[in-house]
Amino acid sequence: MSERAGLQAFVDAIGRAAWQARVAELEAAIAAGRRSGRAVLQRHALELAIARMLRQTQPLLSAAEREIARLSGLIVAHLGSLAPRRRARLQAELQAALHFPHALTPIFHHIRVAERLRARGFAVAFSGLDVEAPLDFTVTRDGIEAEVVCDVVSAEEGRDVPRRAWLQLADRIDADLQTWLAAHPGRYLLKMTLPRGLRAAAGQETATLAALHQRIRALLEGQRRADQDEAALLRLDPLMLAGAQADEMGLMAQLRGEFGPEAHLSVTRANKGVLVMAARATREDDVAAAVRRRLETLSGSRLSGARPGILAMFLEDTDLAEWRALREHLRLEGEARQFLTAPAARGVIAVSCASRAELLGLPAPHAASEGELRFRNPSHPAARSAALAPAILSAH
């Protein structure tokens, strides 16, 4: 089956009408906001890439395109190998992935983990589909079995100021900023410190953003330089950035160097006026700790404890720079190893972690050199098992 035929078969397996409706919904969400659209592009990169590849006539050229097509073909082949009842369950999962806030990423992660273990010599049995077990599948090599749970955790869970919320705020206030800049030409910096972050209870997200929007508008309209309470400190100053480049990408690069990797930045222009918003929480982002918290939940809820357990994590909503920093600064390793020393990890023999970089087959240093990070639990009774070694040991 050709790559394009595999992609078409994948869409047919989901349902062409449902697929087309989903693509139209995503494209509308991207068009609704210049900045928040970038978050949609990132989270739903798989769906949008498949749609783009099916429209184009030239061969698939990039490694990422070929990897998406390959994984799509694996899912189609897996569907074809299942008995009718189990096939219906997987098709239901695929169709559910086409509704907000879901995405295709978990299913692609699932099939990629299974395929990688099979390539290392393991027989894979999809127990989650067979008997609706909490785990995803079991693997066997040389007579030794292990349970595998695949899960996706969002980096947003480790941020007091979620990127999606920030981008939505920047989009909704942009027209006000342009109007203000037209009347007050110049270069300005609006710094925001948010002790409470931008997190909101379910159903309160719009109200939280609206309240901060109104405070920024009142600050500008009142021609004040500062506004402070327990929720936010706002300060408006001249933008003093020597030699700032004229284009937005150049300016953003300089701002990133000035404010650091965790700051949330936005640039609004009107004629010759520029207003930069820079925001951050009072606490540092702790994405790796969010991964550890999810590991603690999974070990107690989705592993039976009867066999060694492998937790295969996928970190969503992170960019290449953040993912590389998490690896190089050993933050993920530190949190994973801390988890593996806790009583909750008694049945866990190893933890792996991957991101979109590995899913798309990007080369190092963007992606982990082995296609994932792996951390073994040395205190597990089967930690030295030669049969399980290809699934639990890392070369580094």
Image: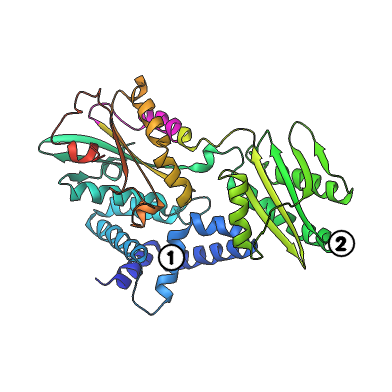
Secondary structure beneath dot 1 equals: helix
Q: In this view, does 120 lie above or below 196?
A: below
Query: Residue 49's mark?
Result: 1
Element carrying mark 2? helix
Residue closest to the eye, 246 or 180:
246
The answer to which quarter of the image holds residue 244 is bottom right
Q: Residue 274 is drawn in which quadrant? A: bottom right
Give the number of marks: 2
Tag 1: amino acid: Ala
- Secondary structure character of the magenta stretch overall: helix
Identify which residue, 37 or 221, lies in the foreground: 221
Which residue carries the number 2 mark? 183
* Residue 196 can be seen, yes or no: yes
Q: Residue at x 39, y 61 (%)?
A: 14
- The mark lying in front, picked from 1 and 2, is 2
Residue 281 position, x and y percent, is 64, 37
Residue 38's tag is: none
Is residue 238 shown left or right of residue 73? right
Span of residues in magenta: 291-308
